[in-house]
Amino acid sequence: MHRPQAHVTGELGEIEVASLFIRQGWQVTKLAPDYGFDFLVQPATSAQLTGDLVLIQVKTTAKHLTRDRIGRAAIRVPSQHVRFWRTVPIPALLVLVELPSHQMYVRACQAIAARLDAGGRNSKTTRVTFAPEDLLCQTTEPVLRRQVTEFWTQQRGYLALHRQLLCTGQLLSMLVTSIPRAADHTSSIHDGIFKALQYTFGTAKALFISSFVPHHEGIVTIVQREEASFPAE
């Protein structure tokens, strides 16, 4: 039975990515079937898993990438995949593997999706550029690990504050509803206080929920580069 070369190329790229993360102490789980992502990874410390989950999509090329005068390369990704990335609730990375050089480059998926939205593009494919500073290797992996750790530490802080806010809101609600409603004028005062507390609680809750929206751009710090100057294909 014929085995497409594209399948071989893809598998070799996945092996290179998995090998790097495993050597650097990450837990790597292959997703099968892979609906949009190839791996679910998380860093480990002293043989203990951290729970700081990250999704990885691998793109592999069997040829040397064409680069511009400052060393940037580009690939094209289906725009429907890019739009799907913006719905993913945890950090996700796009890793490009150049097989001939055994080099890997990384970009944050949600940051790529944000640029697509900002540009209002309607094409079927989206160009994604990779600069020399996007190189993923043993030297740069600790930077990625630190950014992932900082991201999840921040999100856990938001969750803790949200829980405290919920408890406070429930206590205030119980307090107001326990106030006696002896007469009509006290009833209107009671309702006014209750509505004011509801509004305050709802506004604060919305603020914390909006703060919880993951800022995935922080996972890879070099996602805000200007791409317009890259030559068109």
Image (cartoon, rainbow, N blue to C red):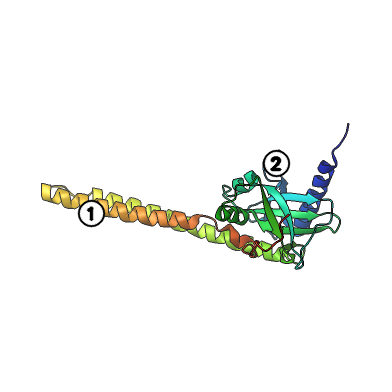
Q: Earlier in the sequence, mark 1 or mark 2?
A: 2
State left or right for residue 100 relative to residue 122: right
**What residue is shown with label 2?**
34
**What residue is shown with label 1?**
193
Q: Residue at x 75, y 68 (%)?
A: 70
Q: Residue at x 77, y 58 (%)?
A: 104
Q: Amino acid at mark 2?
A: Asp
Residue 69, above or below 6: below
**Where's residue 140, x and y in %?**
73, 65
Which of the pair 76/152 is nearer the observer? 76
Please state, as top left, top right, bottom left or bottom right, where the N terminus lies in the image.
top right
State the CA–CA distance, disc 1 to disc 2.
Answer: 52 Å
- Considering every residue shown, the one lying at the far front of the view is 232
Query: Please, what secondary structure does the residue beneath circle 1 have?
Result: helix
Q: Amino acid at mark 1?
A: Ile
Residue 212 image label = none
Place residue 124 in its image quadrant: top right
**Where's residue 83, x and y in %?**
60, 47
**Where's residue 19, x and y in %?**
79, 54
State left or right for residue 62 relative to residue 37: right
